[in-house]
Image (cartoon, coloured by chain):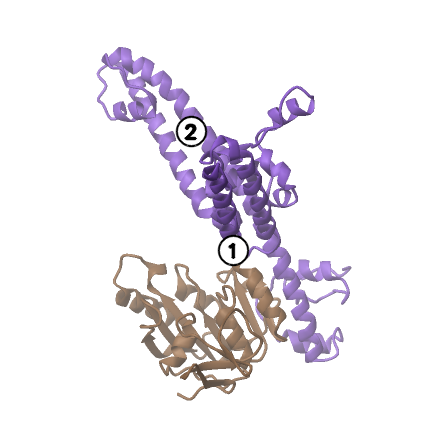
């Protein structure tokens, strides 16, 4: 899978790494305006490193659920169009606000991803839905937010096994979540995110036709 | 806003571009059953010039709303911490009071000389063979339950304090952080206190006695429980208390106004206390 436009492999300290061009967020290495995108700290970064079938071309409209303090969403916004970033916790929101202030089309929303009606009055239909929420019921969250995704859009999702069940075997959890997800999506690619993230599954899916 | 509000309204419906308070409220409290192409609708409704203009407005409104809502929520969290602390104190005090009753009663019933919560926990699982002993055992179980609740509350305080005030919690520990917040009335109030006030929080009686002119000024209030005060020899305790109060005040300000963790604050305090203590050893 080729990289989306606006994401490049650049050299940092003699080693090639993913990078996007934009305002610095924390202390990430930067060379000539290109910021290193660390897959150890970003599940989408890990999905790109693994060459998953992400389908991103660059410039898409994005709804990002579980933006946390904005590390990943800053890179996404660097190569995407209007990007809506939903985060429920107040504490990381301050960082996210800082990240948004340095970017023209990043919109932070302090909202609960399980209640899409509380931000549907702000968020427009999008090309890409990215989800990285550490709550139980991750498939249900993706299904509830499917209404934001255009028919030809894509879901990129990181499933955290421990959020569903701490004791169960991760593979069992992944299969269960994937099965629920198939109520509204067709999965086009799935892959474990090791060695970057333990017990996480990366999923790329498209909305099933006519089930909106 | 004079229009009747439709639950499916866009966030910008009826808003004046310059009214930031109304925009914030609309983002925070509004809702819609389904997303729509809001940017195009805004252009068609004539409230913005074009998409570019719309996104500019949306960005300033969402940034403003996110910042305001986050800080409201965090302020609410310091109040939760204060309630937890007071509930923990009540649960501990009540457990101790009831434990005394259980010890006196149990001592005579079983011919033992146990005391405190430990003794109550010990007899809570015994079998009762008469109606009075049944009540005694039940009361001992209440003590054990209250004691467990107090510990659960303490664990919750330990988990939440670093979220509410990361720098204070790192410097003072979770329990003292909650106590300082409780005495000051909240993080905002603590952040606006002077270092001298923080130094004597919890020693108000001694402070007022001093102000009336018949007592020495108190050197420390609740911060006495901090190792840096208690563990410093009495001669230099005043300096240690002053240094600690100064850094705690800075920590409270950083926590309230930025919320970012600054490890250099604790490092500076560690250095300062080491200097004060070394002074004692030199003499």
Mark carried by residue B85: none
Q: Quadrant of residue B125?
A: top left
Whether the residues at callouts 1 and 2 have beta carbons within 8 Å, the answer is: no
Q: Which residue is mark 1?
A: B264
Q: Position of residue B53 (x, y in %)?
A: 71, 77
Q: Position of residue A19 (x, y in %)?
A: 48, 81
Residue B94 visible, this angle: yes
Labels 1, 2: one chain: yes
Mark carried by residue B92: 2
- Which chain is tinted brown? A
Is the residue A139 above or below the residue B69 in the image?
below
Please state which of residues A195 and A29 is positioned toward the viewer in this rendering.
Answer: A29
Q: Does residue A106 appear to the left or right of A174 in the view shown?
A: right
What is the CA distance from the residue labelled 1 to the residue labelled 2? Answer: 35 Å
Q: Position of residue B108 (x, y in %)?
A: 28, 10
Q: What tint does the image give chain B?
A: purple
At x 72%, y 78%, the residue is: B44
Q: Secondary structure at mark 2?
A: helix
């Amino acid at each position: 899978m080729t990289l989306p436009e606006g994401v490049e492999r650049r050299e940092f300290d003699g080693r090639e790494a993913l990078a996007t061009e934009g305002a610095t967020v924390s202390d990430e290495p930067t060379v000539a305006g290109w910021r290193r995108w660390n897959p150890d700290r970003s599940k989408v970064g890990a999905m790109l490193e693994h060459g998953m079938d992400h389908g991103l071309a660059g410039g898409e409209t994005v709804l990002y659920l579980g933006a946390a303090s904005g590390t990943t969403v800053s890179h996404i916004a660097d190569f995407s169009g209007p990007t809506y970033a939903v985060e429920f916790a107040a504490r990381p929101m301050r960082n996210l606000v800082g990240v948004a202030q340095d970017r023209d089309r990043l919109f932070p929303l302090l909202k609960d991803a399980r209640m899409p009606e509380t931000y549907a009055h702000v968020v427009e239909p999008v090309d890409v839905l990215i989800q990285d929420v550490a709550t139980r019921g991750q498939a249900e969250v993706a299904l509830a937010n499917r209404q934001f995704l255009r028919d030809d859009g894509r879901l990129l999702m990181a499933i955290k096994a421990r959020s569903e069940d701490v004791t169960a075997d991760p593979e069992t959890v992944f299969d269960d979540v994937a099965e629920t997800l198939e109520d509204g999506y067709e999965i086009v690619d799935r892959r474990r995110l090791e060695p970057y993230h333990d017990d996480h599954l990366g999923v790329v899916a498209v909305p099933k036709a006519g089930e909106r | 806003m004079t229009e009747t509000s439709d639950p499916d309204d866009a966030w910008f419906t009826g808003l004046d571009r310059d009214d930031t308070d109304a925009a914030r409220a609309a983002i925070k409290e509004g809702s819609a059953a389904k997303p729509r192409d809001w940017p195009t609708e805004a252009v068609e409704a004539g409230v913005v010039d074009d998409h570019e203009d719309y996104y500019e407005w949306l960005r300033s409104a969402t940034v403003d709303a996110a910042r305001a809502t986050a800080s409201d929520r965090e302020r609410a969290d310091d109040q939760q911490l204060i309630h937890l602390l007071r509930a923990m104190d009540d649960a501990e005090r009540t457990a101790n009071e009831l434990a005394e009753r259980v010890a006196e009663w149990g001592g005579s019933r079983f011919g033992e000389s146990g005391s405190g919560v430990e003794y109550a926990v010990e007899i809570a699982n015994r079998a009762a063979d008469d109606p009075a002993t049944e009540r005694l055992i039940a009361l001992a179980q209440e003590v054990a339950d209250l004691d467990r609740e107090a510990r659960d509350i303490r664990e919750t305080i330990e988990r939440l304090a670093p979220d509410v005030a990361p720098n204070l919690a790192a410097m003072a520990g979770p329990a003292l952080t909650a106590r300082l917040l409780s005495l000051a009335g909240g993080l905002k109030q603590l952040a606006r206190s002077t270092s001298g006030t923080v130094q004597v929080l919890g020693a108000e009686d001694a402070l007022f006695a001093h102000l009336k002119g018949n007592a020495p000024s108190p050197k420390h209030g609740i911060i006495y429980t901090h190792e840096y005060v208690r563990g410093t020899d009495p001669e230099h305790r005043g300096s240690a208390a002053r240094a600690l109060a100064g850094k705690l005040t800075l920590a409270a300000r950083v926590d309230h106004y930025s919320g970012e963790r600054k490890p250099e604050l604790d490092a500076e305090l560690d250095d300062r206390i080491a200097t004060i203590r070394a002074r004692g050893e030199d003499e």
